[in-house]
Image (cartoon, rainbow, N blue to C red):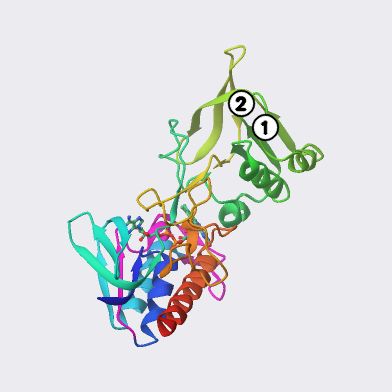
């Protein structure tokens, strides 16, 4: 059995595994895809101390760093259930059952896609999901934000300060964001909001050059020329496989305390799968370290 079993091999999981292994305890890490979302990222400019790096390169260094330590790395394996018996048991999709005194969940999250033509084609070529990450790439350019919930309107306000113009597209007749955010949004000179519209297509040649939408009440089709589209219709945590004993928010995020502990004793969590308010590489790594130290503290007390 392991002392610490980490489920998920993104920045949070890699950091947790290294912090655990450095305590000299038996550590394992299971990951469906080592590197996680970082593998889908092209340029990274906000990983402090590195002016610029690229996703696959950072993912490779994460794995290399983990392998410097005595960690069992189980790649291309997906966990399908977790149960607390004498030890905590994690069952993999291949039928194997891994046992551990503590488990750190770091299964991350995925951005919900809008699923219109052009989205997949122009990912990283004008289609973006993270304003903190990619906003500065659109400095002085025109962008759209799809989604009028809190994250969409926060993104629009943020982007209005960087880009020349922001078009907000909301499917419903009203924005769902908090009114304080809406007031702020409507006070900005370079923002246009279209409500009750359906995004039809993100257009472009080698990169994005516009967005086409349909007015739902008239059926009229409209086109806006722009250089970037931020899809802000939700970040879904990869937590649907967990048991009820692990408290989650209504969005499915695992609730953790300041030590990274979940509501199930011995189970910790870190990174984008948790209720951490901001989802970034550096934040995930910090929370992975916290969860590993939290797990170590738990082990020396049990
Ligand atoms: P993830 O990176 O999501 O990793 C989750 C891990 O869990 C993966 O290994 C996955 O395979 C594994 N997993 C999931 N379910 C299971 C399961 N059931 N069993 C086993 N393994 C499982 N952040 C920045 O700071 N700067 C940026 O520039 C930046 N750009 C981004 C660009 C894009 C396109 C995207 C999508 C994200 C970007 N982010 C950026 C956000 C950043 O990538 C995430 O915040 C970070 O990767 C979260 O780390 P994590 O370890 O919590 O989760």
Q: Is residue 37 among what the camera can see?
A: yes
Residue most toward the left? Answer: 95
Q: Residue at x 52, y 46 (%)?
A: 251
Q: Is residue 152 left or right of residue 103?
A: right
Above or below: residue 145 compared with residue 255: above
How many other residues sit within 10 Å of disc 1, few (<14), some (14-19) or many (≥20)?
many
How many other residues sit within 10 Å of disc 2, few (<14), some (14-19) or many (≥20)?
some
* Label drawn at residue 149: none
Above or below: residue 282 compared with residue 152: below
Secondary structure beneath disc 1? loop
Q: Is residue 212 left or right of residue 93?
A: right
Q: Residue at x 62, y 13 (%)?
A: 217
- Is 51 a magenta residue? yes
> Which image quarter is the N terminus in?
bottom left
User: Are dots 1 and 2 in contact, CB under 8 Å?
Assistant: yes
Q: Position of residue 241 (x, y in %)?
A: 35, 50
Between 96 and 170, the one lying in front of the other is 96
* Label drawn at residue 175: 1
Q: Position of residue 176 (x, y in %)?
A: 66, 34
Residue 93, image quadrant: bottom left
Above or below: residue 213 compared with residue 182: above
Between 75 and 6, the one lying in front of the other is 6
Between 248 and 135, the one lying in front of the other is 248
Residue most toward the bottom? Answer: 24
Q: Which residues are magenta?
A: 25-53
Ligand 1, seen in the image, is in the quarter at bottom left
Q: Is residue 99 left or right of residue 276?
A: left
Q: Position of residue 175 (x, y in %)?
A: 67, 32
Is the distance from the Cβ of mark 1 to the nearest ligand 1 atom less than 8 Å? no
* Label drawn at residue 172: 2
Q: Residue at x 53, y 68 (%)?
A: 282
């Amino acid at each position: 059995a392991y002392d610490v079993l980490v489920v998920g091999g993104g920045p949070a999981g890699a950091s947790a595994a290294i912090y655990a292994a450095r305590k000299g305890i038996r550590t394992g890490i299971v990951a469906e895809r080592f590197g996680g979302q970082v593998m889908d990222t092209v340029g990274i400019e906000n990983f402090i101390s590195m002016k610029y790096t690229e996703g696959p390169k950072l993912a490779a260094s994460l794995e290399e760093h983990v392998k410097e330590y005595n960690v069992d790395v189980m790649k291309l394996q997906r966990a399908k259930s977790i149960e607390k018996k004498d030890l905590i048991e994690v069952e993999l999709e291949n039928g194997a059952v891994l046992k551990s005194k503590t488990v750190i969940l770091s299964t991350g999250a995925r951005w919900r896609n809008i699923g219109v033509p052009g989205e997949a084609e122009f990912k990283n070529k004008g289609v973006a999901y993270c304003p903190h990450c990619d906003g500065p790439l659109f400095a002085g350019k025109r962008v759209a934000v799809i989604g009028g919930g809190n994250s969409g309107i926060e993104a629009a306000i943020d982007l209005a300060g960087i880009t020349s113009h922001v078009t907000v597209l909301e499917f419903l007749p009203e924005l769902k964001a908090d009114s304080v955010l809406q007031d702020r949004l409507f006070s900005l000179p370079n923002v246009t909001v279209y409500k009750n519209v359906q995004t039809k297509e993100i257009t472009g040649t080698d990169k994005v050059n516009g967005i086409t939408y349909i007015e739902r009440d008239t059926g009229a089709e409209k086109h806006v020329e722009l250089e970037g589209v931020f899809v802000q219709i939700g970040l879904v945590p990869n937590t649907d496989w967990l048991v009820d004993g692990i408290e989650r928010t209504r969005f499915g995020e695992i609730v953790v305390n300041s030590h990274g502990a979940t509501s199930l004793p011995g189970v910790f969590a870190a990174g984008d799968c948790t209720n951490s308010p901001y989802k970034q590489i550096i934040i995930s790594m910090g929370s992975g370290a916290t969860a590993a130290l939290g797990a170590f503290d738990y082990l020396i007390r049990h």
